[in-house]
Image (cartoon, grey):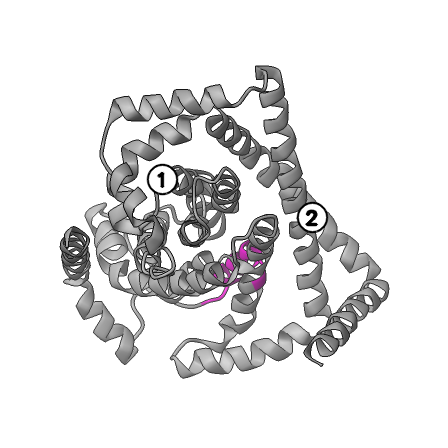
Amino acid sequence: MAQILKTLLLSMITISIAISLVKFPDQSLEASIRGLNLWWEVVFPSLLPFFIIAELLISFGVVQFIGILFEPIMRPLFNIPGVGSFGWFMGMASGYPTGAKISARLREEKQLTRIEAERLVSFTNASSPLFIFAAISVGFFQNSSLGVLLAVCHYLSNTFVGICMRFYGKKKDKKNQNKRNESSKYSVRKAFTAMHRTRMNDDRPLGEVLGDAVIHSVKTLVMVGGFIVLFSVLTKLLFLSGISTFIAHFLGKLLNFASISKDFGLPLLSGLFEITIGVQSISVVQDTLLIQAVLVSFILGFNGFSVQAQVASILAKTDIRFAPYFFARILHGVFASILTILFYKPLYIDRKVFDMEVVPVNHDVPENLWLLILENLAAIGPLLTISFVGISIILLYYRRKK
């Protein structure tokens, strides 16, 4: 019965979208072109080199080399092999969905168990620094100083998500404990031996390796482009049909309950579907910069359904489950929002004063009780964060030693 209802629901949704495309052909075409331009001018040229290099580094065994060197760091912090550090660094450098792509490839290469791959993919899909500083801070807000606050909160909260997800599936992953203990020793010689062995085991000629890297990368990016165009059209159709306005009305009431203007309802809803549209819409709402930064941080951490669909498509080719990744996105959004409130004064207000810049009036902290309390905590927030992280690492070390 459940499958019958699912079939009817999916059919009705698809039919509704088809009818909307016929009813709004011009607007659908415009949204499709906008999504295509975004993919062709920004996403494709920025991600293609990273994807190709990632494929080559895996084929030549460099990832194995990095994995053995970073095993003593990645295992205690995130409970994943050292090879996961490659996905973590590349994910932060090039943005989503690079982390999912690398996690899936490492799983296909049997360098990660399913649980480890699910842990890795949960915190390696971050926004790129270029998007945070250039597109958001300078492009949308015309405020380069805001980029420091958003970047620190985004990447620090992403690290916290990885630390939290280290406990995911711990009982199911105990059978690999002995293997982990043997591979947790730092050794440059062992790392080089593993890299050389990996390259020798791949009997493909250099030309074929290069060709396969380009083909696999282009296939993935074509899929990414399809999702960008699809969600660009869906977002436009939801707005034209009035569904977005209807949902945003209730979302605005929830925001108003949290002392946030209901005008952010529709921009926040747009950001839940597509990051760029949502952030741009939030930037034009006349309100305090703190509220805008908090909502932008949440959207960046949540990734948006468009990015999540891209990740789901990449993971569908493996046995990596999507649910842990989705849970981590909510966790990332919440952590990033809280850190933005805590770090707003030390990383933005105090920094502006230090730089002898005049802070605009609308950048002041609003007179809401809960924000004032959090502002007072901001002075000791970094110290508390570092202290708790240090205590957690010490406890994990002694627990692992026992």
CA–CA distance in space, label 2 to label 1: 29 Å
Q: Residues within 10 Å of mark 2 (few under 14, many from 20)?
A: some
Amino acid carrying label 1: it is Ser
Q: Main secondary structure of the magenta part?
A: helix
Regarding residue 51, the answer to whether it shows in the image is yes
What quarter of the picture does the N terminus occupy? bottom right
In the rendered image, residue 209, in percent from the top left (x then y), is placed at: 58, 22
Front residue of this view, candidates 200 and 367: 200
In the rendered image, residue 240, in percent from the top left (x then y), is placed at: 73, 69
Q: Which residue is mark 2?
A: 226
Q: Secondary structure at mark 2?
A: helix
- Lateral position of residue 289 relative to residue 9, left or right: left
Q: Which residue is mark 1?
A: 85
In the image, what residue occupies the spot 68% across and 69% down?
239
- Lateral position of residue 149 relative to residue 250, left or right: left
Front residue of this view, candidates 27 and 98: 98
Question: Is 138 inside the magenta-drawn segment?
Answer: no
Front residue of this view, candidates 309 and 295: 309
In the rendered image, residue 75, in percent from the top left (x then y), is placed at: 28, 46
Q: Above or below — where is 258 with respect to 318? A: below
In the image, what residue occupies the spot 47% across and 60% down?
302
In magenta, the rendered stretch is 273-286
Q: What's the mark number on residue 395? A: none
Q: Secondary structure at mark 1?
A: helix
- Lateral position of residue 381 relative to residue 308, left or right: left
Find residue 52 and report its image quarter: top right
- Callout in the foreground (2, 1): 1
Sequence-wise first label, 2 or 1: 1
Q: Residues within 10 Å of mark 1 (few under 14, many from 20)?
A: many
